Image (cartoon, grey):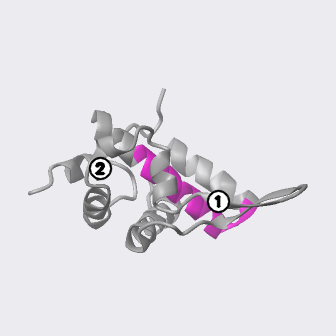
Amino acid sequence: ERYPETRLLRQVSGVGSLTALTFVLTLEDPQRFAQSRSVGAYLGLTPARHQSGETDRSGEISRRGDRLMRTYLFEAAASLLIRVRQDSALKTWGRALAKRMGFKHAAAAVARKLAVVMHAMWRSTPPFQAWPA
């Protein structure tokens, strides 16, 4: 009740009250980030880069942010991919990614996208659309 923003964020498939509340408390102010995609990097959900001379490869996620928030987002992403029955663009994208890369990599990518979507919703307060136009 103290955080009405969580009601908006719980509209996203797979996101529950605990994940929404932790997201609000971790980020504190949605205006803190100029772009929503910066939230993924802040939470440590973007791939680490390994560069040396001619080599340039992407590694595992950087894990530089709040560990608890990252865990909750990963659980929400896994829930979206496995348990949620309602189909959405994010679920379809995640399932295709899981076939190519494996479930854990896909869940980490979906977790990053969930963070970006939730931040964008929190900033401009549009309702969640399973299939955006």
Specify the quadrant that holds the N terminus.
bottom left
From the viewer's perspective, is residue 112 above or below residue 83?
A: above
- Please tell me whether the stretch drawn in magenta is mainly helix, strand or loop: helix
- Residue at x 45%, y 38% (from the top left corner): 35
Query: For the residue labelled by badge 2, is the local secondary structure a helix, a strand or a loop?
Result: helix
Kindly check if marks 1 and 2 are in contact, taking CB atoms under 8 A apart as contact: no
- Residue at x 90%, y 55% (from the top left corner): 54
Q: Is residue 44 visible?
A: yes
Q: Which residue is mark 2?
A: 9
Left or right of 53? Residue 18 is left
Q: Indicate yes or no whether the magenta region holds residue 104.
A: yes
Boundaries of the magenta span: 101-117
Mark 2 neighbour class, 10 Å CA radius: few under 14, some 14 to 19, many 20 or more: many
- Residue at x 61%, y 48% (from the top left corner): 93
Label 2 sits on what residue type? Leu
- Residue at x 39%, y 73% (from the top left corner): 68
Find the distance from the CA under tag 1 to the CA under tag 2. Answer: 25 Å
Q: Which residue is mark 1?
A: 47
Q: Nearer the viewer, residue 38 or 114?
A: 38
Q: Nearer the viewer, residue 67 or 87?
A: 67
Q: Earlier in the sequence, mark 1 or mark 2?
A: 2
Label 1 sits on what residue type? Pro
Q: Position of residue 124 (x, y in %)?
A: 30, 33
Q: Is residue 86 visible?
A: no
Residue reaching furthest to the right? 54
